[in-house]
Amino acid sequence: MALKLYGAPMSTGTTRVMIALHEKDLDFELVPVDLFAGEQKEPPFLSKNPFGLIPALEDGDLTLFESRAITAYVAEKHNETGTDLIRHRDLKESALVKVWKEVESQQYDPAISPIVYQHVVAPIRGQSPDQAIIDANVEKLGKVLDIYEARLSESKYLSGDFYSLADLHHLPFTYYFMKTPYASLINERPHVKAWWEDISSRPAFKKVAEGMTFGDL
Amino acid sequence: MVVKVYGPAYGSSKRVLVCLVEKGIDFETVPVDLIKGDLKQPDFLALQPFGVVPVIQDGEYTLYESRAIIRYYAEKYKSQGSDLLGKTIEERGVVEQWVEVEAHNYHPPIYNLTVHILFASKLGFPADEKLIKESEEKIGKVLDIYEERLSKSKYLAGDFFSLADLSHLPFTQRLVSEMGKEYMIRDRKHVSAWWDDISSRPSWNKVKHLQ
């Protein structure tokens, strides 16, 4: 049975899952959820995710939400097809995938997402960007990227010399971030810049990036 | 090999410690003092470059991020102690889902409450009353969804205790005890029964007072 992914092609959570599905060479159907009409907060969708957030994945009888849980599930279930995103054959490599996935989730995402939100989403909603929030998070993100720069001077990818979910999870927000005036935070750090150019040129991401249009960006 | 866990007094480290007890893994603790600035010292930063707890050392492994560490031990010692991941790939998926819910929906507001109610004066900045109020409202909304979920299954990921429940222990303990907000749990029948169940596990009683 084909996988059904409920979401929107410009959403960071939805695209995080789509990239993983492409890396795994899995067929899926994207079932659009109209964010601007608030469909994700209405009963049919709320039965899939009571928190009213996209995406949600249906795989036969199983429905899952939370993008990073879905990518973990897909990567484990299909660990023998496509790119190995969790390094399941090597205990140490898989441990480091877990560590850097959480670094993305707990250190990187909280800093980058408010910048993208203020710069990209707020104007669409008719709000003016809050510069104080942007400034505070630009500073926070810079400190996180200093640590990434050091890490990526030792290994090609975050968890080691292999591409994994830890890198993949960074793609959606960083893609939008690179269209803001703060892209220099990535570009002025040579190892981070090389890493970004590498991971954003993977075919699985390029396919998904085509649909990532948001307002004027 | 004994696992060395830094910062046993803090919530995120207790997330790791309670997992180690559930799995029957021996550990020793290394106290660190956040208030004194131990986390920003070069020795600590060499282990954990982001300057936050926890970090563990296990032979040649140095690992950080509590939810990464608990996943690692739950997977490595799958058949030892309590099974915290579920029996099938599908159950594991549901465990992952609720661990992520904890990390992204429950943790951010409860962490804000912890910082502003319990640590602001010690760290020398004024508590943000507006943020406290907003955070409490957010936790309330998340707990309403938990109430619904727990009316259908005994634990968050199903009828088995898992990493998803375990992950909630340290900060919920602070909410009901030091923060004086036990009513948030008690006002919700199924959440209340769930809390009594998970917080009375021997593993949590062993870990909760570690300093």
Image (cartoon, coloured by chain):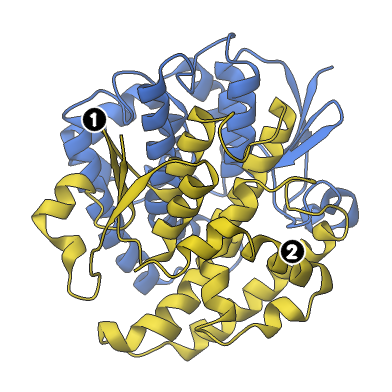
Question: Mark 1: few, some, or many residues within 10 Å (few <14, many ≥20)?
Answer: few
**Which chain can be seen in yellow?**
B
Question: Mark 2: few, some, or many residues within 10 Å (few <14, many ≥20)?
Answer: many
State which quarter of the image contains the N terminus of chain B.
top left
Q: What residue type is labelled 1?
A: Glu
Residue farthest left in this picture: B42
**Spatial separation of the CA atoms under disc 1 and disc 2:** 38 Å
Q: Nearer the viewer, residue B33 or A94?
A: B33
The residue marked by circle 1 belongs to what chain?
B
Task: Report the disc number at residue B9.
Answer: none
Q: Is residue B164 left or right of residue A186?
A: right
Q: Is any atom of residue B3 visible in this view? A: yes
Residue visible at 17% across and 74% down in the picture: B36
* Residue for badge 1: B60
B37 in relation to A189, above or below: below
**Do badges 1 and 2 share one subunit?**
yes
The residue marked by circle 2 belongs to what chain?
B
Shown colour of chain A: blue
* Residue for badge 2: B194
Residue B66 is situated, as x and y percent measured from the top left of the image, at 42, 49
Residue A37 is situated, as x and y percent measured from the top left of the image, at 79, 56
Q: What residue type is labelled 2?
A: Trp
Residue visible at 79% across and 37% down in the picture: A63
Q: Is residue B200 left or right of residue A91?
A: right
Residue visible at 81% across and 53% down in the picture: A39
Q: Which of marks 1 and 2 is nearer the N terminus?
A: 1
